[in-house]
Image (spheres, rainbow, N blue to C red):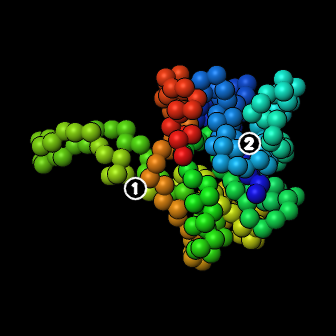
Amino acid sequence: MKVIILAGGLGTRISEETLDKPKPMVLIGEKPIIWHIIQIYARQGLKDFVIAAGYKAEVISEWINSEIKRDSNWISNLNVQVKFTGEKTHTGGRIANCIDSLEGDLFLATYGDGVANINISKQVEFHKHNKGIVSLTAVRPPARFGHLDIVGNNIKNFGEKNQADEGWINGGFFVVNRELVAYINNQNEPLETGAFPQLARAGRLMAYKHFGFWQSMDTLRDKDNLTLMANSNAEENLPWFNI
């Protein structure tokens, strides 16, 4: 089964790191986050990857080529293709460009800036059972702020907010049927405001609830937190590899 990694955005919210490279090439520890994402799938038996590149696509291509030349063990048994999908194309267009050039009816997809210990086999099983067009991981974001109970002007309770108190959000790991392309209207349409709302209205967008580890890299703070985890743990003990 093919895995599509959306890796073409500008990464403006972490611009301190993305002036000279695309966001998926930001280092987490000693390796770019896209390496970690590929490993999440590869360690579960997935071998075929299409990187839907855009902004500074050449940086990703050069990295893949250098890893192949170094005969790195991690890439030797994988098929990793970098596909340029346009500088300004949005996520819907990037997915459509990739699916149109691939064989098969079922694909996996994810963003190039988040990691999770998602069990891919269980998510695919869920998708097939529920007969949706897209099954996305629903996650609860890490709680970041203290919780205040206020009565009038008085704080009656101050404490750490529990992650379980947060609402469900899109965790960015998808199982996708080819039929998705029929819901993508043009290259400039994000999945999140185009195809996904349409599918939700049609009852064809399914939520696979993930209760394990999940972390996106939206900001420099997120990057620093992930780097701390990478530097504090042996590779095999990283929380996103603990499936």
Q: Residues within 10 Å of mark 1 (few under 14, many from 20)?
A: few
From the viewer's side, name the closer residue of 97 and 27. 27
Residue 62 in view of the camera? no
Q: Residue 167 carries which label?
A: 1
Q: In the displayed structure, would residue 88 be above or below residue 135?
A: above
Q: Residue 8 carries which label?
A: 2
Instruction: Left or right? Give the position of 183 relative to 69.
Output: left
- Describe the element under mark 2 as helix, strand or loop: loop
Q: In the displayed structure, would residue 223 be above or below residue 86?
A: above
Q: In the displayed structure, would residue 155 be above or below residue 192?
A: above
Disc 1 residue type (three-letter): Gly
How many badges with numbers are in the image?
A: 2
In which quadrant of the rendered image does the N terminus lie?
Answer: bottom right
Where residue 88 appears, as percent x and y from the top left, is 76, 45
Disc 2 residue type (three-letter): Gly
Q: Distance between the residues labelled 1 and 2?
A: 28 Å
In primary-sequence order, the first of circles 1 and 2 is: 2
From the viewer's side, name the closer residue of 72 and 64. 72
